[in-house]
Image (cartoon, rainbow, N blue to C red):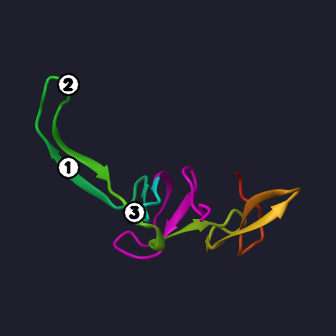
């Protein structure tokens, strides 16, 4: 199945503790059905000091389920679903809310 959400897409969280927050996808894990979104679903990782790093409480973005995020519509800025259509013999993604073609 084609990827509806890709690395670099701007998304909004639909459910969970970060509902309504926006961020950019930094990594997609299609096997697990999860993605890592910058600034969303952050956990504190306690690390010990070493020669290479300072140590302390380091915030880390943890994966969020793909069903809990939606692409941000390029026109109105709200959440939208993603569809596929053929333009000039090429398969492209488009926002179902506005019909706008997405990059890539």
- For the point 71% across and 53% down, the residue is 103
Q: Nearer the viewer, mark 3 or mark 2?
A: 3
Gap in Å between the C-alphas at discs 1 and 3? Answer: 22 Å
Question: Which residue is labeled 2 in the image?
Answer: 52
Q: Nearer the viewer, residue 88 or 63?
A: 88
Q: Nearer the viewer, residue 100 or 93?
A: 93
| Circle 2 SS class | loop
Residue 10 rendering spot, x and y as whole percentages? 57, 57
- For the point 15% across and 47% down, the residue is 46
The earlier-in-sequence mark between 3 and 2 is 3
Q: Which residues are magenta?
A: 1-27
User: What number of labels is visible?
Assistant: 3
Looking at the image, residue 58 lies above or below residue 35: above
Gap in Å between the C-alphas at discs 1 and 2? Answer: 16 Å
Question: Which residue is labeled 1 in the image?
Answer: 45
**Mark 3 Cα-neighbour bin, 10 Å: few <14, some 14–19, many ≥20:** few
Most common secondary structure along the magenta stretch:
loop
In the rendered image, which quarter is residue 102 located in? Answer: bottom right
Q: In which quadrant will I find the N terminus?
A: bottom right
């Amino acid at each position: 199945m084609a990827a509806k959400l890709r690395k670099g897409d701007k998304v909004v969280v639909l459910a969970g503790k970060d509902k309504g927050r926006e961020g950019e996808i930094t990594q997609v894990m299609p096997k697990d059905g999860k993605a890592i979104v910058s600034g969303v679903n952050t956990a504190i990782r306690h690390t010990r000091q070493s020669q290479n790093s300072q140590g302390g409480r380091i915030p880390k973005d943890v994966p969020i389920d793909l069903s809990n995020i939606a692409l941000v519509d390029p026109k109105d800025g709200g959440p939208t679903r993603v569809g596929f259509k053929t333009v000039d013999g090429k398969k492209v993604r488009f926002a179902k809310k506005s019909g706008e073609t997405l990059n890539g």
